[in-house]
Amino acid sequence: MADTTRITVTLPTDQDAELRKLTDNVSGYVAEAVARQLRHQLLGADLERHQEEYGAFTEEELSRARSRIFGATDGEGSASAA
């Protein structure tokens, strides 16, 4: 099992109530949310470094990336809403 640290987090009362409707494992839920946010920030930093080195992504590159992430596109390169 991974090492853990006990912390105290303060949430607005309405958020606490909604969170407890979603899960009986608040610690696990919060840990997953933090992990997801950390991955998001690390990916963003990697993308910024890539663009600093190689230039901004082209529309073609963005379209290909959307296709790989979301599957079929609507023909204009943006992800389908379906």
Image (cartoon, helix red, strand yellow):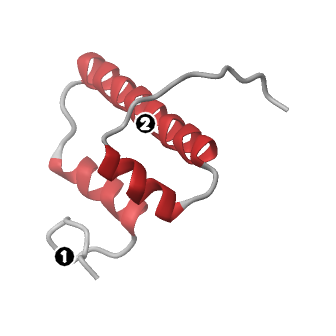
- Residue under label 2, please give it: 37
Element type at mark 2: helix
Q: Quadrant of the C terminus?
A: bottom left
Going from N to C along the chain, the mark reached first, 2 or 1, is 2
Q: Amino acid at mark 1?
A: Gly
Residue sitting at 35 percent across and 64 percent down? 67
Element type at mark 1: loop
Q: Position of residue 37 (x, y in %)?
A: 43, 36
How far apart are the alpha carbons under marks 2 and 1? Answer: 31 Å
Horizontal relation, residue 73 to residue 34: left or right:
left
- Tell me if mark 1 has few (under 14), some (14-19) or many (20+) residues whose alpha carbon lies within 10 angstroms of its own: few
Horizontal relation, residue 81 to residue 70: left or right:
left
- Residue under label 1, please give it: 75
Q: Amino acid at mark 2?
A: Gln
Q: Position of residue 8 (x, y in %)?
A: 52, 24
State the residue lying farthest toward the front.
13
